[in-house]
Amino acid sequence: MAQLLDEKQAWIADLLHSIEKKLLVREQFYRHLIKNVTLLAVLKSLQEEIVAIKEEENILPISEFNSIIHQNHYGGTLALYLREK
């Protein structure tokens, strides 16, 4: 039995090292996931607040206006865009 362990020692060490590596990668993945989910939740809240303000104040940003004009009137051809001053 001891001889078999001696023969497979390098293989066992490599196996344990690869398992440790995979666990480390998984841990880093979950840390990044938690960090990014938090940021995405904040961005989603900001977006919802902006939509609420636009509806409340009856505001249409110039970028949305330009997009609507382009889609409805020019059918994909190049058109001049209005610019805020």
Image: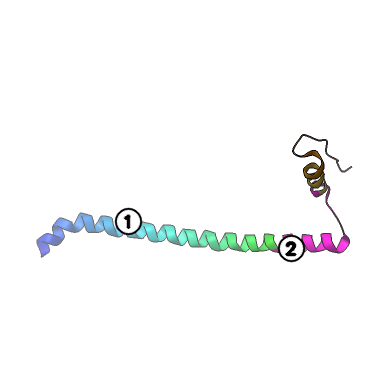
Q: Is residue 23 magenta?
A: no
Q: Which residue lies at the image location 86% right of the left edge and 56% below the top edge?
A: 59
- Indicate the position of residue 63 as horizontal and vertical percent values: 80, 47
Frontmost residue, 66 versus 10: 66
Q: Position of residue 47 (x, y in %)?
A: 73, 59
Amino acid under disc 2: Glu
Residue at the image position 88 percent from the left and 61 percent from the top: 57
Magenta segment: 45-64
**Mark 2 crowd level (few <14, some 14–19, many ≥20, 10 Å Cα):** few
Helix, strand or loop for the magenta stretch, by majority: helix
Left or right relative to 5: residue 46: right
Q: How many marks?
A: 2
What residue sits right under mark 2 in the picture?
A: 48
Pair 2/1: label in front:
2
Question: Which part of the image, by quadrant, shows the N terminus?
Answer: bottom left
* In this view, 84 is above or below 25: above
The residue depicted at 71 percent of the width and 64 percent of the height is: 45
| Dot 1 amino acid type | Ser
Question: Which circle's residue, 2 or 1, is located before the other in the chain?
Answer: 1
Q: Quadrant of residue 75?
A: top right
- Residue 19 in picture, x, y percent from top left: 33, 60
Q: Please name whichever residue, 7 or 53, is drawn nearer the observer in this view of the structure.
A: 53
Q: Splitting the image into 4 quarters, where does residue 21 fall?
A: bottom left
Q: Residue at x 48, y 59 (%)?
A: 29
Q: Is residue 62 left or right of residue 42?
A: right
**Furthest residue to the right?**
85
Q: Secondary structure at mark 2?
A: helix
From the image, tell me which residue sits under label 1: 18
Q: Nearer the viewer, residue 48 or 64?
A: 64
**SS category of the residue bearing label 1:** helix
Tell which of 20 and 55 is nearer to you: 55
